């Protein structure tokens, strides 16, 4: 079911419940989608020189998949744009 269809179904259910219009609006706003920004982070391990990419919603540190070294910061990050979550 499309996001618009899900929201329409929720609104229909809410209309059948006996609540105030103001409260109904608050509930609908709660179910609206949130936008997050995704990044493609490029990492390089300083110990074993392994390079890898990973998608995150922030520019966070990662762990080397080869040697397990932790707290490696990305040397480059690309903005992949916005993505909607529900």
Image (cartoon, rainbow, N blue to C red):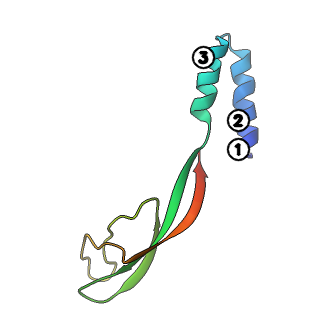
Q: Quadrant of residue 60?
A: bottom left
**According to the image, label 1 marks what residue?**
3
SS at mark 2? helix
Please say if 42 is above or below 82: below
Query: On residue 40, which mark appears?
Result: none
SS at mark 3? helix
Instruction: Please count the marks in the image.
Output: 3
Report the front residue among 35 and 69: 35
SS at mark 1? helix
- Left/right of residue 9 with respect to residue 57 in the rendered view: right
Of labels 3 and 1, earlier in sequence is 1
Position of the N terminus, as image quadrant, is: top right
Q: Quadrant of residue 77?
A: bottom left
Question: In the image, what residue occupies the spot 23% across and 86% down?
Answer: 47
Q: Are marks 1 and 2 in contact (CB under 8 Å)?
A: yes
Where residue 17 appears, as percent x and y from the top left, is: 68, 14
Query: On residue 7, which mark appears?
Result: 2
Position of the C terminus, as image quadrant, is: top right
* Mark 3 vs mark 1: in front: 3
Question: In the image, what residue occupies the spot 26% across and 69% down?
Answer: 71
Q: Quadrant of residue 14?
A: top right
Q: Residue furthest bottom?
A: 49
Mark 3, other Cα within 10 Å: few <14 / some 14–19 / many ≥20:
few
* Mark 2 vs mark 3: in front: 3
- Left/right of residue 57 with respect to residue 24 in the rendered view: left
Where residue 70 appears, as percent x and y from the top left, is: 25, 71
Q: Are marks 2 and 3 in contact (CB under 8 Å)?
A: no
- Left/right of residue 52 with respect to residue 21 in the rendered view: left
Question: In the image, what residue occupies the spot 31% across and 77% down?
Answer: 64
Real-space Cα separation, disc 2 to disc 3, in angstroms: 16 Å
Query: On residue 23, which mark appears?
Result: 3
């Amino acid at each position: 079911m499309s996001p618009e269809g899900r929201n329409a179904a929720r609104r229909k259910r809410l209309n059948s419940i006996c609540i105030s219009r103001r409260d109904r609006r608050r509930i609908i706003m709660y179910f609206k989608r949130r936008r997050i920004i995704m990044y493609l982070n490029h990492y390089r391990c300083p110990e074993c020189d392994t390079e890898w990419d990973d998608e995150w919603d922030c520019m966070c540190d990662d762990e080397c998949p080869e040697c397990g070294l932790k707290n490696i910061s990305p040397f480059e990050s690309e903005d992949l744009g916005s993505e909607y979550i529900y």
